[in-house]
Amino acid sequence: MASHLSYCSVRYGLEERGWILASGLSAVTSRLMKLVGKDHQRFLATQRECKDIQSKIAASRKDLQKHRALHNC
């Protein structure tokens, strides 16, 4: 049996969401670094976008922890 099939589907979805968010943060961080010293307003907007994604990652982690504690999976 494939390892992903042995997971609880809810847990798998929560983990997948975390990976998607982390991947998005990586892309936005890369964009942020390219803006250093070029466009201050776009830099600030992109910095806020990074912080928003970081908050979503933290919330996703808490959701995963809650799920794992409740369902022991």
Image (cartoon, grey):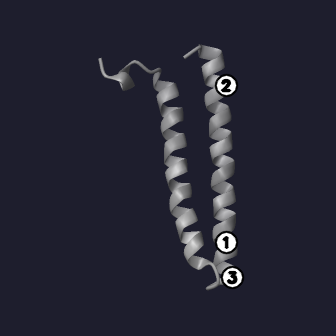
Question: Does dot 3 land on a helix, a strand or a loop?
Answer: helix
Position in image of residue 15 (x %, y %): 51, 34
Q: Nearer the viewer, mark 2 or mark 3?
A: 3
Q: Quadrant of the N terminus?
A: top left
Q: Disc 2 to disc 1, how far (Cα)? A: 32 Å
Give the camera-side residue of 63 and 54: 54
Q: Nearer the viewer, mark 1 or mark 3?
A: 3
Q: What residue do we see at 65% from left, 16% from top?
A: 70
Numbered badge on residue 40: 3
Q: Amino acid at mark 2?
A: Lys
Crowding at dot 3, Cα within 10 Å, few <14 / some 14-19 / many 20+, comes out as few
Residue on which the image places disc 2: 66
Crowding at dot 2, Cα within 10 Å, few <14 / some 14-19 / many 20+, comes out as few
Q: Are marks 2 and 1 in contact (CB under 8 Å)?
A: no
Q: Amino acid at mark 1?
A: Ala
Q: What residue do we see at 56% from left, 56% from top?
A: 25
Q: Earlier in the sequence, mark 2 or mark 3?
A: 3
User: To which quarter of the image does residue 36 belong?
Assistant: bottom right
Q: Vertical placement of 26 versus 4: above or below?
A: below
Question: Does dot 2 land on a helix, a strand or a loop?
Answer: helix
Q: Amino acid at mark 3?
A: His
Asked if residue 39 lies left or right of residue 13, the reply is right
Q: Quadrant of the C terminus?
A: top right
Residue on which the image places disc 1: 45
Position in image of residue 32 (x %, y %): 59, 70
Crowding at dot 1, Cα within 10 Å, few <14 / some 14-19 / many 20+, comes out as few
